[in-house]
Image: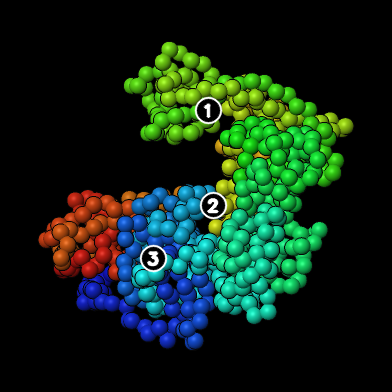
Amino acid sequence: MRIRRFFTALLAAALLLGGCIPAHAAYDMPYYIGVDLTNQIVTVYNTEDDTVARQMLCSSGINDSTPEGTFYMPPKGRASERTEWTWYDQYDSYVKFSTRIWHGYMFHSLPYAKRDESTLIEESARELGTPASHGCMRLRVDDARFIAQNCLVGTMVRIYKDTEKQEELRQLLLVSSYTGEGGMSYTEFLGYADDALGRGSGGTEVSDLQHRLRDLGYYDGDMGGRYDTDTIAAVKHVQADLGQPQSGVTTAELSELLYSENAPVSAGQITIQEGSSGPVVKRLQSALNTLGLYEGELDSVYDLDVADAVRRFQGVCNFKVDGVATPEIQQALYYVLSKLEATFGAGTIPAAEIVTEEIQMATLRAEANIVVRSKPDTSSDYLAKLHDGDTMFVEAVEGDWAKIQTGSVTGFLRKKYLEPFTQENVILSFRGDDGTSYTIGHTMEEYRSGAQSLADEFAAYSASLQGASAQDGGDSAEAELYVAVNTGSDDVTLNLRAQANPDGEILAQVPNGTELRALGAADGWTQVSYGGQTGYLLNDYLHFPEDDSGDEESEPEEAKRELEDMTDAEAVAMAVVICGSEESAPVYAADSEDAELLGNLTEGVKLEVLAMSDADDWVCIRHEGRVGYMLDANLQFQLM
């Protein structure tokens, strides 16, 4: 940004201060956009006929920080807008496909910790559909990309609050955005159908369908025979599993399949427990039987024996032990099963060897959050914060304190907050005739040495899938990630370890350049299968495809270097701060209101003008030796 402006150009710019972007009429643009803050829904309309081109959930600003009104998309405020990655210095995060609405308010993706799609900030994904941002509109990546690439400068954006809550539409958009892909009309997306079961249908046929969807594990709503949004969402999940367009409509062909022996069975959409029945229970029984945890009949009935088997699986993986197969428990079970099949082959998984030990556990019982401390002393450092109902390992009791371990944290809690109990720790070992082995669970000693529980491993895996889902607007297909060993030399191999720590048992040595499919993730490690062994590789010696996108720190570091370079630059003009109705005018670290705020200057302060920024309406200034950027509307220029 070292652009020198001659005085004539500078004065010309000063004459344009406060100028507005021409208000292009909506009919000049192919699309116009409505943002419903009440329902957190963004709708892109076709200007030609006012039909819906795309519709999506968003997260607007908390505490009404998103402005209401009609705006027209301005030109870029910074070069990275409408491109794949934009750095937000103020919030220490990256977003994708950022498009300016007005001043610092943007459409953009959910935020990322790094310039890497696997670093999606999980909380933002959970919050989608509720106010959660600092004022911008957060979207799924594909939705943000569509706006950035198709909604041109001058596109009208109307931000408003609806008078009615549209919860059914929100539930549909939570499953997936409406994109019109595959020729699906908006009416079809809403679940309406002329010659099939869809929104508005009712009666015994719909009630029978709802019961069947429940038995298949897709539906746990009302069975009253009304084809509502919950039913549509369940059918969409079925269609996603079948690889079909997700219309939510039950055609005669789909209905025939659902009632056949070849019907798809959910791998974890609803909770099943004692009293449940149907194919979804039979699938659960079969998986538990393969793991050696269930020896009963595959009779499709969730009885006490099934509940006991689920408890043992929960104990093996370090989940909460209650015998209830929540969607998370079912998904974790099939995740383990897929890893066994990857290791031994489908249909050839050996019988499990079961080892048990009793371990001392405790449940936190407190109305407020309780702090884990580094020492049995209230003045010592706090390591983590736990909540009522959290469970943990108890290593020892020292007076009024208990030494506990939860996740990767080992520390001390007041004993009075703990409800102790003894849990059977189960370890499952599988060993093939060729020596190939796979183990689920760890001994207490291994946990104390930092071994990761399968519950934590699965949580990391689920987060990676959630990130992939945020990329594609809700497509449930799994994205496979491949990594390559990169030791720097073909003479150096990388150790495959049984646990995700440097002291873990070495299972194999993987040659440099070997490409492997990632099965899971731990802190700084990636789980893979190699030579029939499943273990962990250290991320420091792996190449990830996302690394090609560039150094995640390049943009902020470049901005800092740029300011440093400008410190000794000669001023080309002087200026006086004008604040208008505000008490002061802000100074930023870069030419964007999204950049770090360096401070504020009051009315009448004199400063030096170093350059006009590449971004419209911004000026690089220097005041008392410090360099920053201000909007030219806050400056009155003077000749030197």
Viewer can see residue 456: yes
Residue holding disc 2: 116
Three-letter residue code for mark 3: Thr
Name the N-terminal-most of marks 1 and 3.
3
Q: Considering depth in this image, is 199 or 337 the residue closer to the camera?
A: 199
Name the N-terminal-most of marks 1 and 2.
2
Q: Considering depth in this image, is 300 or 459 the residue closer to the camera?
A: 300
Residue holding disc 1: 392
Three-letter residue code for mark 2: Asp
The residues tagged by marks 1 and 3 sit, at their Cα atoms, a distance apart of: 41 Å
Q: How many neighbours does mark 1 have within 10 angstroms: few (below 14), some (14-19), or many (20 or more)? A: many
Instruction: Report which quarter residue 613 is drawn in.
Output: bottom left
**From the viewer's perspective, is the residue at label 3 or at label 2 nearer?**
3
Q: Position of residue 382 (x, y in %)?
A: 39, 28
Q: Residue 413, relative to residue 636: is it above or below? A: above
Viewer can see residue 310: no
Residue found 82% across the figure and 38% down from its top: 349
**From the viewer's perspective, is the residue at label 1 or at label 2 nearer?**
1
Look at the numbered discs 1 and 3 and tell me whether their residues touch, using CB distance below 8 Å.
no
Residue holding disc 3: 38
Instruction: Tell me the SS state at disc 3.
Output: loop
Q: Residue 220, relative to residue 536: is it above or below? A: below
The image quadrant where one finds the N terminus is bottom left
Look at the numbered discs 1 and 2 and tell me whether their residues touch, using CB distance below 8 Å.
no
Residue found 79% across the figure and 35% down from its top: 295
